[in-house]
Image (cartoon, rainbow, N blue to C red):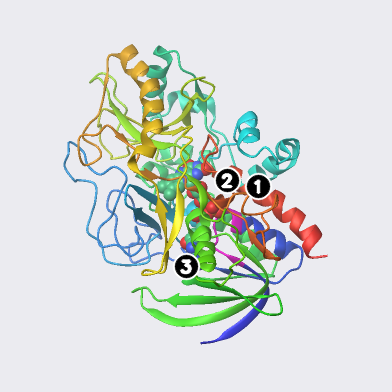
Amino acid sequence: RRAGFSPAVVIGTGYGAAVTALRLGEAGVPTVMLEMGRLWDTPADDGTVFSGMLAPDKRSMWFKTRTEAPLASFLWIDVVNRDIERYPGVLDRVGFGDMSVYVGRGVGGGSLVNGAMAVTPKRDYFEEILPEVDADEMYRTYFPRANAALGVNRIDPAWFETCESYKYARVSRRHADRAGLTTTFVPSVYDFDYLRREEAGEVPRSALASEVIYGNNHGKRSLDKTYLAAALGTGNVTIRTMSEVRAIRRQPDGTYALAVRERDDTGAEVATTELGARHLFLGAGSLGSTELLVRARETGALPELSDEVGRCWGTNGNVMFGRANHVWDVTGRTQSGMPALGIDAWDDPEHPVFAEIAPMPAGLELWVSLYLAITKNPERGHFSYDAATDSARLHWSADQGTPTIAAAKALFDKVNRANRTIYRHDLFGDTRSFENRFTYHPLGGVVLGRATDLHGRVRGYPNLYVTDGSLIPGSTGVNPFVTITALAERNVERVLAEDFA
Ligand code: FDA
């Protein structure tokens, strides 16, 4: 057991963590980041860093023996998943009975595996979910700051109309138009100029080589290329990989002591180290940060943590489903793995839905229109502590997902009626057509203004902060990483000004 100390420690390397580390580093604060996953920068024997989606290998998933892709089957046959070796791969699926949560593992967190959709929430909905946050300030300062630092860019609309890569999106748009629905371009952190050159055959393919969910070898501005590169560039930030924080204690002098488990690529523990911190920032994501605090409260390590810790968790109303296309509605063999278009029905008074037109990049024509919809589901889950496994358990029941399906179905029944099409029933392992037993967008658990103050300071514990998706009360109405990033920018600015003086 080795011991060490750093004035500031940030747990995790996802959006909230990366923002925090950059701003601490710029302010001259020596900062250590602890990440349980690997650093993804070294090509394997096949010359690539990540394995693709069509032939996933051990790099795809976090210590599993078979991949667990969200689309479980095609024509009810499990053609999608593959046996793999146990390895600290980049995507994890954490199962809790009726709900599975997908998260990224590695330096960059979710930015390594996500679809790169970079959407600023609608202002009136942001005001509804976080009414105590000054929206003027967010929309004037922090959303623009986040968008700039993340490298958000927009597709060239003229190219979109003629390219092969988004034929599938144009088909879905036509179907939405017939039902009177509105579509909108979705900004991205995938470099659309690079994508254009992929289609022109000028550069190695990534989005056009079916790369999504298990990492992109090119084109994506993941956090390791933006915020984290800048953080390391300050000279004040270091990142320790394969280092999972297991426990947090408060010392008599008010500093924090962390128990850190270091593992090798087989998963074997190689060391347990202790690291001290004066200022401790939790950026381990909605599942990770909530678990650390629930465990700390229930084991008596941080007994003053409020009852709000572990509450108000949501799926952002996620649901995935496919529609069967007519034979003449071909979507093309080359589908960009990075979505560029959404159906925006968020202002529908009864069934607010924002549906991303998702690719099915199998390299062949499948006659499917796929969607990942975000709906306004008011249900919330909560976490308890399971002493036997020393882990936090999410409580979310199947019936809590009902409003999600009702909203998506109400809207897409209209699309089907207008186009004389039907839903697919063969994509999720059984005959269901709506899959809401997983989420890509876990949010909440340590909500801003409830479990923390209005800037992410954990109630009851000075110099302890939460910086990630745990702060958002279960829903943002759009894909969440821009909201998480902007909120972290806002909070760290205040914390640096007031708590580091
Ligand atoms: P995030 O989850 O990014 O990072 C947490 C990090 O902490 C991880 O690297 C984890 O390994 C590490 N960690 C956890 N516990 C730890 C511990 N105890 N010790 C040390 N390290 C620990 N969003 C969006 O806006 N647009 C999109 O297109 C998509 N698409 C998408 C696709 C897929 C497949 C997924 C899984 C997710 C998305 N998302 C998305 C969601 C988005 O990626 C997600 O909301 C953010 O990554 C969450 O950012 P956080 O900062 O909360 O944590």
Residue toward you, 155 or 260 = 260
Image x and y of residue 100, in percent: 36, 50
Q: Amino acid at mark 1?
A: Leu
Q: Amino acid at mark 3?
A: Met
Image x and y of residue 181, in percent: 46, 17
Tell me if mark 2 has few (under 14), some (14-19) or many (20+) residues whose alpha carbon lies within 10 angstroms of its own. many
Q: Which residues are magenta?
A: 10-17
Q: Is residue 234 left or right of residue 206?
A: right
Residue behind mark 2 = 472
Q: Is residue 475 left or right of residue 204?
A: right
Q: Is residue 44 above or below residue 146?
A: below
Q: Is residue 180 left or right of residue 21?
A: left
Tell me if mark 1 has few (under 14), some (14-19) or many (20+) residues whose alpha carbon lies within 10 angstroms of its own. many
Q: Are marks 2 and 1 in contact (CB under 8 Å)?
A: yes
The numbered mark, 2 or 1, whose residue comes first in the sequence reads: 2
At x 51% / y 62%, what residue is drawn?
A: 294
Residue behind mark 1 = 487
Is any atom of residue 194 visible in this view?
no
At x 66% / y 74%, what residue is drawn?
A: 277
Q: Is residue 251 left or right of residue 397?
A: right
Q: Is residue 452 above or below residue 274?
A: above
- Label 1 lies in ligand 1 vicinity (Cβ under 8 Å): no
- Label 3 lies in ligand 1 vicinity (Cβ under 8 Å): yes
